[in-house]
Amino acid sequence: MPRGIKRERNISDELTAVNAQIAKHEATIKSLKLQLSSLQEEQEQSELRNLNKLLKESGLTTQDLANIIVKPKEDIA
């Protein structure tokens, strides 16, 4: 039983269509990466504000905190 007329593929058009889809998705990814970067920066600023608030409430300076976190090498044994 005949299956109909076999169409010829236009590979050039298919390549163009695939390249267009890739470009569209790359633009979307670029936009999402910018959004991600902005959100990460916003989160970091929020965390720094919270840390600064805690330091002020506790009466510690940033140097005091650094001395607590980074211990001298002789203490690390």
Image (cartoon, helix red, strand yellow):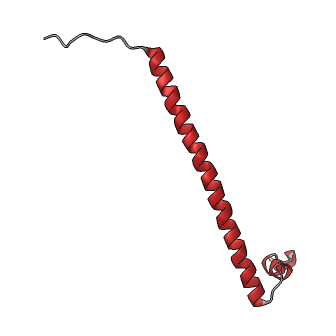
Residue 61, horizontal then vertical, whole percent: 83, 83
Residue drawn at x 72%, y 84% is 54
User: Residue drawn at (49%, 21%), measured in percent from left and top?
Assistant: 15
- Quick check: 70 above or below 23? below
Instruction: Pick the quarter of the image with the N terminus.
Output: top left
Residue 37 vertical position relative to residue 5 in the rendered view, above or below:
below
Q: Which percent across, then down, holds residue 18? A: 48, 27
Which of the image's four quarters has the C terminus?
bottom right
Query: Residue 29, relative to residue 11: is it above or below?
Result: below
45 relative to 10 in the view: left or right = right
Question: From the viewer's perspective, is 49 left or right of 35?
Answer: right
- Is 69 on the left or on the right of 11, as rendered? right
| Residue 51 horizontal/vertical position (percent) | 72, 78
**Residue, far bottom:** 58
Q: Residue at x 61, y 43 (%)?
A: 30
Q: Residue at left 31%, top 12%?
A: 7
Residue 45 sits above or below residue 69 on the image: above
Q: Nearer the viewer, residue 63 or 15?
A: 15
